[in-house]
């Protein structure tokens, strides 16, 4: 099976657009669904690469990733949204125009001299795809910092991880299947623990807005 | 097989602890047995490494000199913290602060925490090391929120989020280092393979990779400005966990940085990584010194002191030469001294029920032995002679005096500030009359033996460094 660099670039654009829409979205459930879509694209990228190399172990990893990131994690998060009626709490520190400026800056940074060598890791045709995956990483970091909600911060971290996985896939840096499964297992445990913490935070503070947590300052 | 037992013992202990029903004595027995066995296993490995260079089990696990020093620290402090935990939790149960379920949760998680740290040290694969260090975050998050108070919850959340971000950045840096491997290399990748291929690494990628690795693992290590989670987490966790977080875990994160430093240095020379370590080390020492000076909470003060000492170790590796020897020795001394301070701070907390310096007066009259241990710990941690930290700080500064005189002057100033800050707080706590509502007398002798044992070891090795530790550190110096 042949995969053109343009097709990989197209998938990376979809991953990139998912994190952009996470920034724009005000609804928690939308952010969760966008994460599920982003994970579908990342898992899809792995499926394509596994078919290209006839690597069935990689296919198994992609399926495990699909199960955890597309089914289990979003379900956990949507349950949280439903349980605590967290419909509209994905607000951010910066207003929308400033957020958009931030997105432009972080995307632009990937085309500076600092990140220039990254594009040379792969062939010239895939260089931009790799830079776009770095942009996903930076914009996910911006999402974690800019959003006030604990749920959005959690999704930001998982989106950051998706960006790194897509970077590794495009750069041909996949680890052995056992290690990849180890990382996916780690993500599963992280999701469970973070969700439990989010519930505990809601019980203690009555909100998932992290700006309302001020007990450490008062200590 | 002995190497495997080091990770099997805490794993089995954790599973057994999970199965215990309503019997604290069984939990205590499991903890004592596991901590003794893992200490013995670790000592066998450490002595073997000192004699033969490395200790390996198939290609997946191996301990070199650097790993052996870390193994020694984790097992020794792990042993002492585990023994202390038994009496500490008993006292908290007696005060009705916690119940059996919490005690069981504590022991299940502390064994998992130790398991993750042992695994990070002995694995030869950088990705497995990353997974293990991430596992330390996951296993300790519930230990930090142990008391279920809003502030503890907040500290644990901050810890989970900031460390997860840091570790993902470290993972990105790790992947960048992997670009040195030939295309299509998907087999078992260990440190030796990376080192052998280090010259293939693009210099610009090498620089970028080290920046991400330093920021990533530096977050876990507590380097400023990525340190913001540390004072909250270390001050909110139960003291045996604080002693492990401060005295052990930060070193494990530093180990990850040092492993990558070797590869990056082979690729582009040592100057780049040394400059970054000097920068982050200096900033960490300086910021911690000013905050210690104005600190009102003694557990937070100890946490900031850990940031300062991590900065000193980074500086030692940044300066190079004798600084590397001193930094490794400093790691050993700091782990012992910080654990003494946290464990004696635990005794103070049990007696005064407060972590605020203003609420603690007359420790020497209320808790005479704890007061002496706390005072000795203070003298050790601030580098007062004859404690070993005086020598290591002296050597680190002298290794940098010719190339970086201004930085050395800044550090001397910061160390003086730290001493003043500690002296002011400790003297206010230790001397004078204790409040009338505070009963006099130590809570339990088993709360005194662990920190006393540590201070005894610290005093002895300040004067007489065992040959096996010296030979291990010498081997590390040859590498760096």
Image (cartoon, coloured by chain):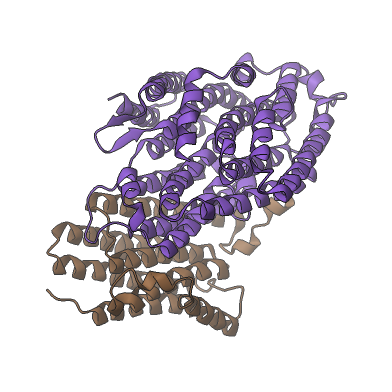
Whether B136 is drawn above or below B33: the answer is: below
Image quadrant where one finds the N terminus of chain B: top left
Say which colour chain B has: purple
Residue at figure coordinates x 71%, y 22% from the top left? B386
On the question of residue B318 being in view, the answer is yes
Q: Position of residue B257 (x, y in %)?
A: 48, 47
- The residue sitting at the top extreme is B445
Number of marks: 0
Residue at figure coordinates x 60%, y 21% from the top left? B454
Q: Is residue B292 left or right of residue B88?
A: right
Say which colour chain A has: brown
Q: Position of residue B16 (x, y in %)?
A: 36, 27
- The residue sitting at the front extreme is B402
On the question of residue A199 being in view, the answer is no
Q: Position of residue B146 (x, y in %)?
A: 55, 40
Query: Between residues B346 and B72, which one lies in front from this camera angle?
Result: B72
Whether B398 is drawn above or below B281: the answer is: above
Query: Between residues B364 and B336, which one lies in front from this camera angle?
Result: B336
């Amino acid at each position: 099976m042949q995969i053109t660099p343009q097709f990989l670039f197209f998938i990376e654009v979809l991953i990139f657009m998912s994190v952009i829409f996470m920034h724009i979205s005000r609804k928690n459930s939308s952010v969760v669904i966008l994460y599920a879509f982003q994970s579908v694209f990342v898992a899809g990228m792995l499926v394509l690469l596994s078919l290209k190399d006839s690597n069935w172990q990689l296919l198994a990893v992609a399926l495990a990733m699909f199960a955890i990131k597309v089914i289990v994690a979003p379900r956990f998060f949507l349950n949280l949204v439903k349980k605590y009626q967290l419909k509209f709490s994905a607000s951010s520190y910066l207003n929308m125009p400033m957020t958009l400026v931030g997105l432009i800056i972080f995307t632009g940074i990937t085309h500076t001299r600092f990140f220039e060598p990254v594009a040379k890791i792969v062939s010239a045709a895939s260089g931009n795809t790799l830079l776009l995956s770095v942009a996903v990483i930076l914009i996910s970091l911006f999402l974690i910092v800019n959003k006030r909600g604990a749920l959005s911060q959690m999704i930001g971290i998982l989106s950051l991880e998706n960006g790194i996985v897509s970077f590794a896939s495009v750069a041909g840096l996949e680890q052995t299947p056992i290690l990849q499964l180890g990382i996916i297992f780690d993500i599963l445990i992280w999701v469970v623990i973070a969700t439990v913490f989010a519930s505990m935070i809601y019980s203690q503070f009555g909100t998932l807005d992290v700006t309302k947590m001020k007990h450490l300052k008062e200590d | 097989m002995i190497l495997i037992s080091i990770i099997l013992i805490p794993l089995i202990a954790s599973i057994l602890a999970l199965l215990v029903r309503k019997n604290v004595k069984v939990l205590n027995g499991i903890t004592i047995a596991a901590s003794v066995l893992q200490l013995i296993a670790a000592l066998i490995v450490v002595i073997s490494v000192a004699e033969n260079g490395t200790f390996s089990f198939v290609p997946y696990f191996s301990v070199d000199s650097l790993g052996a020093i870390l193994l020694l620290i984790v097992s020794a402090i792990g042993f002492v913290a585990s023994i202390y935990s038994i009496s500490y939790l008993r006292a908290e149960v007696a005060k009705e602060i916690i119940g059996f379920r919490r005690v069981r949760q504590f022991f299940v998680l502390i064994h998992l925490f130790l398991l993750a740290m042992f695994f990070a040290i002995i694995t030869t694969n950088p990705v497995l090391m990353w997974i293990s260090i991430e596992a330390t975050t996951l296993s300790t998050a519930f230990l930090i929120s142990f008391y279920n108070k809003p502030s503890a919850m907040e500290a644990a959340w901050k810890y989970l989020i900031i460390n997860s971000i840091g570790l993902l950045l470290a993972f990105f840096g790790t992947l960048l280092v992997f670009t040195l491997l030939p295309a299509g290399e998907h087999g078992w990748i260990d440190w030796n393979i990376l080192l052998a291929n280090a010259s293939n690494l693009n210099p610009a990628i090498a620089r970028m990779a080290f920046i991400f690795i330093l920021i990533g693992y530096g977050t876990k290590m507590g380097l400023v400005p990525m340190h913001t989670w540390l004072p909250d987490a270390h001050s909110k966790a139960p003291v045996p966990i604080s002693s492990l977080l401060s005295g052990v875990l930060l070193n494990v994160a530093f180990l990850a940085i040092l492993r990558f430093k070797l590869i990056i240095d082979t690729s582009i020379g040592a100057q780049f990584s040394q400059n970054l370590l000097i920068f982050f080390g200096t900033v960490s020492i300086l910021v911690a010194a000013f905050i210690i000076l104005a600190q009102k909470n003694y557990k937070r003060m100890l946490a900031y002191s850990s940031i300062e000492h991590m900065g000193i170790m980074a500086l030692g590796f940044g300066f190079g030469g004798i600084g590397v020897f001193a930094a490794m020795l400093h790691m050993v001394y700091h782990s012992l001294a910080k654990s003494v301070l946290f464990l004696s701070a635990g005794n103070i907390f049990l007696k005064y029920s407060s972590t605020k310096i203003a609420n603690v007066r007359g420790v020497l009259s209320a808790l005479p032995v704890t007061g002496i241990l706390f005072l000795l710990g203070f003298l050790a941690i601030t580098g007062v002679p004859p404690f070993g930290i005086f020598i290591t700080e002296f050597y680190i500064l002298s290794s940098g005096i010719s190339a970086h005189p201004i930085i050395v002057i800044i550090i001397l100033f910061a160390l003086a500030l730290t001493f003043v800050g500690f002296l002011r707080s400790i003297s206010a706590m230790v001397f004078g009359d204790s409040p009338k509502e505070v009963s006099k007398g130590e809570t339990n002798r088993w709360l005194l033996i662990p920190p006393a044992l540590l201070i005894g070891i610290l005093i002895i090795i300040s004067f007489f460094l065992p040959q096996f530790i010296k030979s291990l550190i010498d081997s590390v110096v040859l590498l760096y």
